[in-house]
Amino acid sequence: MPLDLTQLSQITEPLLAWYEKNARVLPWRENTDAYRVWVSEIMLQQTRVDTVIPYYERFLRRFPDVAALAAAPEQELLKMWEGLGYYSRVRNMQKAAQQICEKHNGIFPNEYEQILSLPGIGAYTAGAVASIAWNKPYAAVDGNVLRVVTRLTADSREISNTKFKNEITAALQEIYPVDKCGIFTQSLMELGAVVCMPNGAPRCTECPLQSLCSACAAGTQPEYPVKKKQAQRRIEEKTVLIMIYAGRLALQKRARSGLLGGMWELPNLSGKADTAQIQKWLAKHKITQCRIVKGRPARHIFTHIEWQMDSYLIECGQVSADSDFTWITEQDLENEYALPTAFKKVYTQNRPL
């Protein structure tokens, strides 16, 4: 059954009025320059607002415009992103910035299709930038907006269905207020973030759309949105080594492709290795006369994978001059090298010898 445009058309005025009075003060709302909107939207993917704010402000101080981002050394860029995860996001941002410099003279494009053509930008981000920065009637349909619309209309179709998502996008674009496109986009996002929330009971008594909401009328809010059952997360066991030699920590680069591709990591073995296996591995890498102490275990959850990690602290006595590893100081780790959260977690909870 198609969405009821008559019902949807009634939400515009009360939603805009509510947003004007209740919108949170956020740094990316103070200046809706396209570059700034884009940076905020990429950072906010998979990440909470309160986590993003200090990253956003620091990132813009270092990379204030497209040209600065395009020219940034990759290691510095990854260090600025450290802790946000999903590092492909920032790599794609740099590719997009370089493309803007090459094809658009360093000026962020203002046409939806041009924005959509940039690396790492999908329909949601393109819609957010086009509407918020350029006041164009393009919807930005994310999880918050899907939740609001499916509860409002009591629509039980499964939200990962591309056809359904496209239908919601098209329906919303039919009701966009011509002179307030950016504000309308943000009002939908805001309602889903602070009122029509995903976890716990929605705050229906605070909702400007309560009288229009089919799910609220039926008392069926928790039933929406309907989501596809997630596949069971795959468990991977690892043994992570915190190797210290002459006061320096060993790091190595991951393969360029795959999970955490091209990132720095602590040396590690697949599976749960014992001391004898670790000694054999160290000898293979020409590292001898080591003291090995069992560390504390840790785990880290990615979207579809869970790492269960044992750890060992290793004081290396002799290291070959042609070692496969990069040996860095604590200060280097703090200031220069981006270590993914999974490995940072192991390192911080196991103090070096």
Image (cartoon, rainbow, N blue to C red):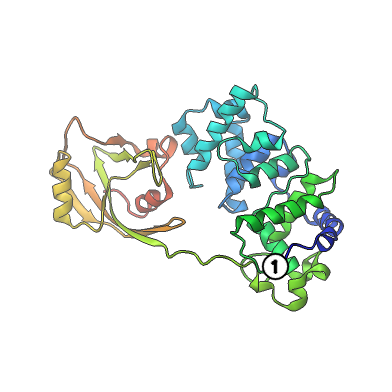
| Quarter of the view holding residue 320 | top left
**Left or right of residue 297, residue 288 in this image:** left
Q: Which residue is identified by label 1?
A: 155
Residue 185 rendering spot, x and y as whole percentages? 75, 49
Q: Position of residue 353 (x, y in %)?
A: 26, 48
Q: Note whether 157 is above or below 349 in the view shown.
A: below
- Image point 43% across, 65% down: which residue? 232
| Residue 235 % position (x, y) | 35, 61
Q: Amino acid at mark 1?
A: Asp
Please tell me in which quadrant of the rendered image residue 11 appears: bottom right
Number of marks in the image? 1
* Quadrant housing the N terminus: bottom right
**Residue 266 screen position, x and y as percent:** 32, 45
User: As drawn, is 28 to the left or to the right of 87?
Assistant: right
Q: Residue at x 35, y 50 (%)?
A: 347
Q: Residues within 10 Å of mark 1 (few under 14, many from 20)?
A: many
Is residue 193 among the parts visible in the rendering?
Answer: no
Query: In what element is the residue under mark 1?
Result: loop
Along the line of sight, the residue nearer the viewer: 141 or 50:
141
Q: Is residue 209 above or below residue 177?
A: below
Residue shown at the point (56%, 30%) measured from the top left = 69
